[in-house]
Image (spheres, rainbow, N blue to C red):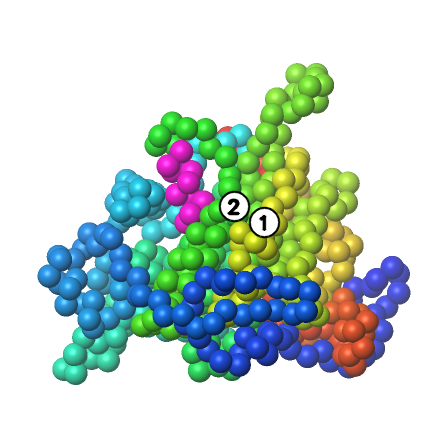
Amino acid sequence: MLVIQRHGEPRRHTRPAGMRRIPPRLLAVPTPHHPPRSRPTATGLQFPAPQKQQPWRPQHRPSLSSSCFAQLSTLTSPLLTDATAIPPISRSAFSTGNDIPLPLLDKHGRLDPSVFPKLPFRFHTGIGLFAKRTPRPFPPPFLSPPSGSFSDPLSTHDRSRDRRAYVDGQLIQGCTNGDDAVFTSDYFIGANDGVGAWSTRPRGHAGLWARLILHFWATAIFQDAAAATQQGDPYKPNPIACLQRAYEQTIEATSEPNDWQGTTTAAGAQLFYRQKKNGESEGGGDAVEPLLYVTNLGDGQVLVVRPSTREMVYKSTEQWHWFDCPRQLGTNSPDTPTNCAVVDEVPIKEGDVVLAMSDGVIDNLWTHEIVEQVSENVEKWQKREVKPREPVVGFEGEEVVEYDDCGMGYVAEELMDAAKAIALDPFAESPFMERAIEEGLAMGGGKLDDISVVAAICRKNVS
């Protein structure tokens, strides 16, 4: 059993912790999704009044004739989702009708990093996942479209062995972990934490919200890169604008007639570069250095660790309304990316490890423990004291975790196991327990929650 000590002392024995909350007023009366019109005030949170919203209709349907689409629009959701009904998507970008090019997709339907201009640095990634309970299946129309008439089967799910989820004809990117969602790529990583209390609501699905926002967020980033490449313009990341676009698209996708409610936090890191200042590149070194764009909204966290010196380079700041109620995007929440999300530009070095984590990690491990875990496991990997992780398949076969040849899969798994050991120990000391005691709550032990870790090491791009 893994035993972690804090400042040389064993963890104290206390009682188990409770479940993370969402604001009671968010759960009081379900209302249609719409962009909030007010922000938090000093006296409390203001929530928007119900507002009728027209269902979204796509501008482009390459697989359907206009007459067929007119008939289907009255029977099903406007979002095509069945893999058997979706023709292969071309590798060439095409327009959605809003002059925003869709990103290039690889042969597996995943976002293709080749849309980015040639960047001097890239990520090598790995993930570690633990779900406190089996994730809820995605509802129709995201996984299985409803039948078109009383004579049809109730579902078209049996027509294909493909159980992956789709939205607007495109494979939903990333991977689901309980109510969390993670995404990895060569230049962008993210971890969203859906607020699990929505599972008690009839139309609540926090896991869907977490996954859709992360999907649209990553897609928007790749779209911006593809547009800049095609037009020959210089590319510069704008993660908040992309997150705002993702937030609005998720509202549309979960509005009537679908009507799925939920909220989620968002944490992501995009790798770019910058020119070194005068005097920094003396001695024949590189003229550029990696630059990280860190975006955070809520209580997720992005942490940068430098294993060579065993130190923390950067840690994002958590955002709260009050204890155990983070800022969150979704149903009835006044928070929006434009008004609440924070972006930090963080200079890093080659070999630094970037972690995108849900609060299941930071509620059970202190920062110095995370730094020690990552540094020790990177050293073990470099000394070849561990074997590479074999390929595994995610929930419902939706995401293949490829063969781990960079060590980040091992680092992420070990960090997840360390947090899991504390989360399952009712007599452990944890950061969540200390914060609860400071709030006057009689809680103890680790916090059982979904634990999601994305580990990415910065390397030179030699491809």
Horizontal side of residue 225 vs 378, given as left or right = left
Horizontal side of residue 352 vs 118, given as left or right = right
The magenta stretch spans residue 131? no
Dominant secondary-structure state across the stretch colored magenta: helix
Which residue is label 1 attached to?
295
Which residue is label 2 attached to?
239
Residue type (three-letter) at the residue carrying disc 1 = Thr
Which type of secondary structure does the marked residue at label 1 adopt? Answer: strand
Q: Position of residue 55 (x, y in %)?
A: 30, 66
Instruction: Report the residue at 30% width, 58% height from top.
Output: 168
The magenta stretch spans residue 222? yes
Where are the magenta residues, as a range? 218-228
User: In the rendered view, would you say 236 is above or below 144?
Assistant: above
- Front residue (pair 430, 424): 430
**Label 2: few (<14), some or many (≥20) within 10 Å?**
many
Dot label at residue 21: none
